Amino acid sequence: MILSMIKKNKLLVLVVLVYAGIFIFAPETALKSVNNSMYYLLEMIQVLPIIFLLTVLIDAWIPKEWIIDKLGDKSGFMGNVFSILLGSLSAGPIYAAFPLSKMLLKKGASITNIVIILSAWAVIKVPMLLNEMKFLSIEFMAIRWVLTVVAILIMGYLMGLFVKKKDLPEDTKEEASLSVNTDYCNGCGICIKIAPEHFEMVDGKANVKTQEIHKENRMKVKTTIEKCPVNAIGME
Amino acid sequence: MDIFVIAFWVITGVLIIVSLIKDKKKTVASMKKSKGMMGNMLGSIVAIIFLIGLVLTIIPPESIQSMLGSSSTFLSTVAAAIVGSVTLIPAFVAFPLVGSFVDVGASIVPAVAFLTTLTMVGIVTFPLEKKEFGTKFALSRNVLSFGFALIIALVMGVIL
């Protein structure tokens, strides 16, 4: 249990260890770093709940077909323009865009458009443009903006050429992922009776045979989740 | 909180209430799904924030000025792009910093490279990007962004 938590949060554990080391050898540097982090922590607290609500809204109300049509592989130039707008209307740093982009990928957006959204999110932000105008100049801002938009479009297309959906991690792909928690499974076999296409018995425990769930089998799989006596079947 | 963030809060807040009224079950189901996804990322995000704090202590924004003003434009541009990739300074600190420097007469080429990599290339956020989108995606995106930051900087140097 604790081990799997550590495994899941490798980065956090590493950072905590580094901080612990610095606290011992250079407490002042560590304190300063904590202080410097506060600004970002505050920013995250302000922005992350909005991102959470936005992903909820997109998941609940925007149909997959619409995303495929507007941001998918065949959405063309209009899809790119739409992606730039979507990215520019954002709040927060680039990592705040990750959950939203993952949701869009799952719903069928193309890699090109995801790269455009992420990059636009990072660079083209209205408050930032105003700042740039104030401290540099309007020409500087405008020329950098135009060049950046062009660069983002080219980058999106290049990425779309090299990176395919199969290169992405499992959970970003379009289909839902089905799983059996073998710690809970008691090997009753109900799921195999209901949906033999998707479950099989391995060493006395249920096992997921295939992640590909056809539309006509959806209901069956849902029933197995409900009927499983120990709630060991999950779908994300 | 700036006005844009506040506007976002208001808009999403209203929409989520409408969504809850229209179909509570669907909304709650989506909330559970998003909660799982965000929960997986939260640890990494907190880790990254503290990593940024550490980097800012080791490379304070003031020290970047000297980097931008080195005598060779080419070297200082590459150096500025690298510093921009490593650090994550808030934009409202970065623009005045760069602005003050350009006012003194420094070349704008390194300044532009720095401003662009600052937001688009993230060495510190790389582990999170890799975990969420895969190594190939994260690596290609960051390398391309770095390259384009240099190109944008050089083109701006020619135009302005």
Image (spheres, coloured by chain):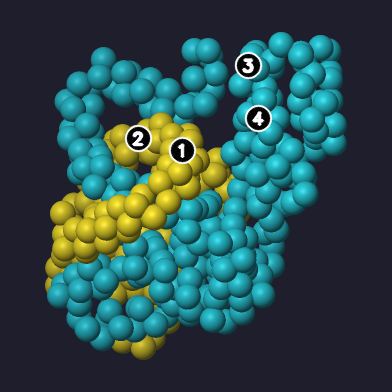
Distance CA(mark 3)–CA(mark 1): 20 Å
Chain letter of disc 1 in the image: B
Image vertical order of residue B56 relative to residue B106, above or below: above
Instruction: Describe the element under mark 3 as helix, strand or loop.
Output: loop
Residues at marks 1 and 4, common chain? no
Where residue B99 appears, x then y in whole percent?
Answer: 18, 70
**Label 2: which residue?**
B46
Chain letter of disc 4 in the image: A
Distance CA(mark 4)–CA(mark 2): 33 Å
Quadrant containing the N terminus of chain B is bottom left
Is residue B31 shown to the viewer in this render? no
Which residue is at 20% across, 38% downward?
A38
Number of other residues with Cα within 10 Å of mark 4, as a class: few under 14, some 14 to 19, many 20 or more: some
Badge nearest the viewer, 3 or 1: 3
Q: Which mark is residue B32?
A: 1
- Type of amino acid under label 3: Val
Distance CA(mark 1)–CA(mark 4): 16 Å
Number of other residues with Cα within 10 Å of mark 2, as a class: few under 14, some 14 to 19, many 20 or more: some
Is residue A73 shown to the viewer in this render? yes
Q: Which mark is residue A225?
A: 4
Where residue B94 appears, x then y in whole percent?
Answer: 23, 60
Residues at marks 3 and 1, common chain? no
- Type of amino acid under label 4: Ile
